[in-house]
Image (cartoon, helix red, strand yellow):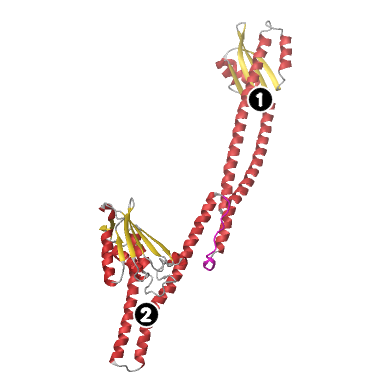
Amino acid sequence: MRTRTKLTLIIGVICVTIVIVFGLTVYFFQNKYSYVDFYKRLEARVRISAQYNLEPGTLDAENLKALRNKHLERLEQEKEYVIEFKGISSADSIAKQLRFPDVFVSDIAEKGNSTSKKGNIFYAGAIHKKNGREYLVIVSAENYYGTHHLIFLRNLLIGGMLLVIIIVVSLSFYFSRQVFLPIKRITDKVKQISTENIHLRLEDSNTSNEIKELVSTFNDLLNRIETAFETQNNFISNGSHELRTPLTSIIGEADVALLKQRSQEEYQRTLQNILTQAERLDEITKSLLFLAQTAYKGKAILFEKIRIDEVIYEAKELIDKLNPKNQILIDLSLIPDDPYKLKTKGNRQLLHLAFCNLLGNACKYSNNAPVTVYIASTQNQVVVTIKDRGIGIPESDMPYIYDPFFRASNARLFEGYGIGLPLTRNIINLHNGELIVRSEVNNGTAVLVKLPFYTD
């Protein structure tokens, strides 16, 4: 069953149930009240009948009858009974003789008055004493108007309820359709989106906030999926190139060497070229494996208390050995006085690798121009900023800098595999930190590393 139909049924059933309960309640209380009101009218006639039948001295009987007939309408099948009552033993015989309800006369004898009903005839009676004798005064009548009013009310309620049910069901269907119409439009639009046109987005409607939030959430999901597709394409394109190049060189060198007999020096040179390309291939493979390991947070890694400034100085020492021409300057003007604000919980080897990658990239892409490292802190983080004066990163390439094997369009003249920055970000993420890259073409790059303070 479709949700729209289910919602229509639920709303319809609830409203119909409420209407039916309301109608039955009105009918029940009206029915009950009509009985009570009619019994009171019969009891009033019992008192009047007793007055002009048993106490004629208080008022002329004919005048009382005329007054009664003038102000009290004649009830349907109205009858009066004034019977001398000779004790409770005579109650059953009187009831059988006059066809009163079985216990009606007995109740009058016990309580002094009573009401009863037999079929459509209502009874009211009381005992009155006159000259030492007891008399049963009983009035009976058919509640014609009450019965017909109830029938009219019943028919009116049934007709009204049917009309309300039709209106409620129609409105439920209409409003459920209106509610689900934006969702249907979203569904139809989503069905049009595939891998061939994943750039399409849902249109932001002017409907309720919930629909807007749904559209926004789905568009965000499409953005992430599109980014993932582009990342995959970049990885396949760049990765296949990086892996194919050394393999092509190895195969080419081997094929050339095997074309004819070579001298010992030529074989050595060929093997040296093959070894170089094999080492390059090995380096790429190790980088990929390490990148995959750091991306998996379920792996157990040893964390300890580390001072960030020590790790940075160790990374600089390694860069000095690998690239003696570097101009890395560690600026201590912003370093906090409290040593606690320099400590974080992490893995020294991983953080050392991350900062070596960042410092190495800063020197490489600035052609060994001055690189400045600032160490500072906030209320709950230690912040390391690395600024260079290099070639920068084009704005169009910024969304893809963390894709493995991706290299900026202006970095093709520099050696590298495009793995260092994605690897560094994975390491920072493992430490619950944040890596921020800000860059401008020909004006250099600034990299911010934020790591939380050490907590016991």
Q: Residue at x 33, y 51 (%)?
A: 380
Mark-to-mark CA distance, 1 and 2: 112 Å
N-term mark: 1 or 2: 1
Amino acid type at circle 2 is Pro
Magenta span covers which residues? 194-207
- Whether label 1 touches label 2, CB < 8 Å: no
Position of 287 with respect to 122 (left or right) is: left
Q: Which corner quadrant of the image does residue 317 belong to?
A: bottom left
**Horizontal and vertical percent position of residue 212:** 54, 52
**Horizontal and vertical percent position of residue 341:** 29, 53
Instruction: Please name the predominant secondary structure of the magenta segment in the image.
Output: loop
Magenta span has 152?
Answer: no
Residue that protrudes farthest toward the bottom in the picture: 261
Most foreground residue, 238 or 408: 408
**Horizontal and vertical percent position of residue 446:** 38, 62
Find disc 2 in the rendering and name its residue. 246
Q: Residue at x 41, y 69 (%)?
A: 391
Q: Residue at x 66, y 9 (%)?
A: 54
The mark found on residue 121 in the picture is 1
Q: Is residue 154 above or below residue 336?
A: above
Disc 1 is placed on an element classified as strand
Position of 14 with respect to 400 (left or right) is: right
The mark found on residue 414 in the picture is none
**Horizontal and vertical percent position of residue 174:** 63, 49
The answer to whether any part of residue 205 appears in the image is: yes
The answer to whether any part of residue 297 appears in the image is: no
Amino acid type at circle 1 is Ile
